[in-house]
Image: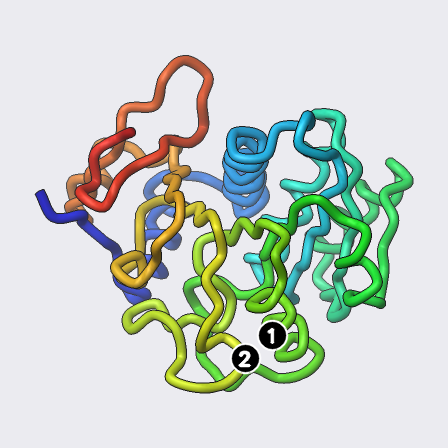
Amino acid sequence: MALKTLSAASAAALDKDLMSVGAFSLDQLMELAGLSVSQAVYRVHPPSKGRRILVACGPGNNGGDGLVAARHLWHYGYKPTMYYPKQSSNELYQRLASQLKDLSIPFTTDFPAALKETDHILDAIFGFSFSGPVREPFSTVIQALSETKIPVTAVDAPSSWEIETGPPKEGPGAVYMPDVLVSLTAPKPLVSFFKGRHFVGGRFVSPVIAEKYDLDVPDYEGIDQVVEIGKDGKRL
């Protein structure tokens, strides 16, 4: 069975439907997405493997998901450090950042130094709406992610990858392959190029919306917000 995926245009339209037909607010969707990501990190990198998590956030919604995930990870007992160099002036993102500062979670501007003091990395820089080229400081960060031996979990897309065509032909992301990918709502076409462990987090998609976009919503167990799936789309 081929894995059903969601194009960038369909993903954007689906988000609009979730906030209109589905009556979700952006805050709610970001909270659920970040919760899903935090659960995936807990699955692949439990605290026994090391509690230090470096969270790299971009200026958009993908970065917001990372901010939420970091808060949940702190409550699980991890020690997140935030790399968030292009902090948005948007009120929502400012509140999310303030929540982390209230927990005394440190923010750093020195990514190379932080990379030497972490056990796992969360890539929440760019999501499905990304289109290149990558600019500084993120080009240097993505190059470092492609070279590090520290495990990386990417949120919705490995940063710098095109949603339809996968990794760029050249540049800092050309050889970037994170260890784990958490597809939010549904997998995107880039998963055909991905070689690591793959999770789907989207336990907020109604049957009506799933039918409209021809999605295969996985069977989530118990209180789980994520499901690990194989190349064929079946749960592992």
Residue shown at the point (59%, 43%) measured from the top left: 27
Percent across and percent down for residue 2 are 12, 48
Q: Which of the numbered marks, if any, corresponds to residue 172?
A: 2
Going by the image, does 64 lie left or right of 39? right
Tags 2 and 1 touching, CB below 8 Å: yes
Q: In the rendered image, which quarter contains the N terminus?
A: top left
Q: Nearer the viewer, residue 152 or 137?
A: 152
| Residue 10 visible in the shown view | no
Q: Type of residue at label 2?
A: Pro
Going by the image, does 1 lie left or right of 223? left
Q: Type of residue at label 1?
A: Gln
Q: Which of the numbered marks, if any, corresponds to residue 206?
A: none
Residue shown at the point (46%, 40%) measured from the top left: 24
Percent across and percent down for residue 60 are 59, 64
Question: In this rendering, is residue 66 above or below 161?
Answer: above
Q: Residue furthest front?
A: 149
Q: Residue furthest left?
A: 1
Alpha-carbon distance for marks 2 and 1?
5 Å
Residue shown at the point (76%, 41%) measured from the top left: 52
| Residue 142 visible in the shown view | yes
